[in-house]
Amino acid sequence: MPLRLIGYWRNEDHPDYPEPSDLIDRDWPDQDRDDIASYLRGGIFFRGFMGLSPCRICGQHNGSSEFTDGVLVWPEGLAHYLTEHAVRLPPSIENYVRQQMDYLDSQKPDIAWWASGAPPTTSIDHPPLAPLRRLAWFGNVQLVQDPDRRHPQLLIAGDTLHLHADGPKARRLVTWYEDLMRATEHDTLPYTR
C-alpha cells in the first residue's frame, strides 16, 4: 500500500493542495494540538531533501526531511504549523493519529522475545516484526482457529471487516486479503482457491 502524503500546501505545481491559513482553528484546545504535534515530531525519518523549507505563514525554517509512521508521510515541519499557528489537520487525520496513540498507550511490552535472544520471527509464538506481515500473520492464525466460516478465506479480525465477512462484500474482502498477502511476500495462501 502506498504511503499517504499529508501536510504539503498549495503551490504552483499543486494548486489542489490546501492553504494552511484556511485550516487555522484558534479554538482547538492546546493539549489536543500538542498531542497531534508530538505524534508528528516522533515520526520515522523517511527521506531528506536539499535546502530548507520555510513556514508558509511566518517564514521560519521548517526542516528538509519527511517523516512517516508507515501509513502517512509528512514534512518535518508540519508540527510547527500546529503548535505555532493552530493549523488543524482534517478530522480523518486527527482521528487516525488519536487511534494510533490510543492503541500504543494500551499496549503492554512483552519482554519474552527480547529476553530469549530475539529469535527469528517465524513461529506461532513470535509474529513477524513488519506491520503488514503481522496483519497477515494474525489473519492466518484466525483461519486455523475458525475454519468453519462460510468464506473461510476471510480471516481478518475486527469490527469493520467482520460486519461483512459472510455478506455481499465477501469477494472484495478476499481480494483485499490476497493483495495483502502478495504485498507482504507471503507466497502461499492458507487455503485453496
Image (cartoon, rainbow, N blue to C red):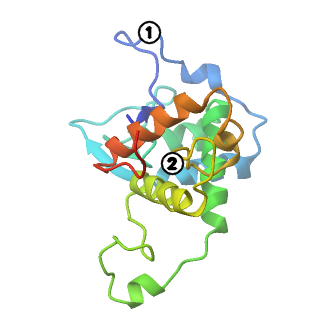
Visible residue check, residue 71 = yes
Please tell me whether residue 80 is drawn above or below residue 147 in the rendered image.
above
Mark 1 residue type: Pro
Q: Position of residue 55 (x, y in %)?
A: 45, 32
Visible residue check, residue 75 = no
Question: Residue 23 occupies which quadrant of the picture?
Answer: top right
* Image quarter of the N terminus: top left
In the picture, the disc for residue 15 is 1
Q: Position of residue 82 (x, y in %)?
A: 59, 40
Residue at 48%, 52% in the rendered image: 41
Q: Position of residue 145 (x, y in %)?
A: 58, 63
Q: Position of residue 47 (x, y in %)?
A: 27, 43
Say what secondary structure mark 2 lies in. helix
Residue at 64%, 53% in the rendered image: 35
117 sits to left or right of 115: left
Most foreground residue, 5 or 170: 170
112 sits to left or right of 90: left
Question: Residue 117 occupies which quadrant of the picture?
Answer: bottom left
Say what secondary structure mark 1 lies in. loop
114 sits to left or right of 100: left
Most foreground residue, 162 or 83: 162
Mark 2 residue type: Leu
Question: Residue 119 occupies which quadrant of the picture?
Answer: bottom left
In the picture, the disc for residue 144 is none
* Image quarter of the C terminus: top left
Residue labelled with disc 2 = 40
Please tell me whether residue 102 is drawn above or below residue 64 in the rendered image.
below
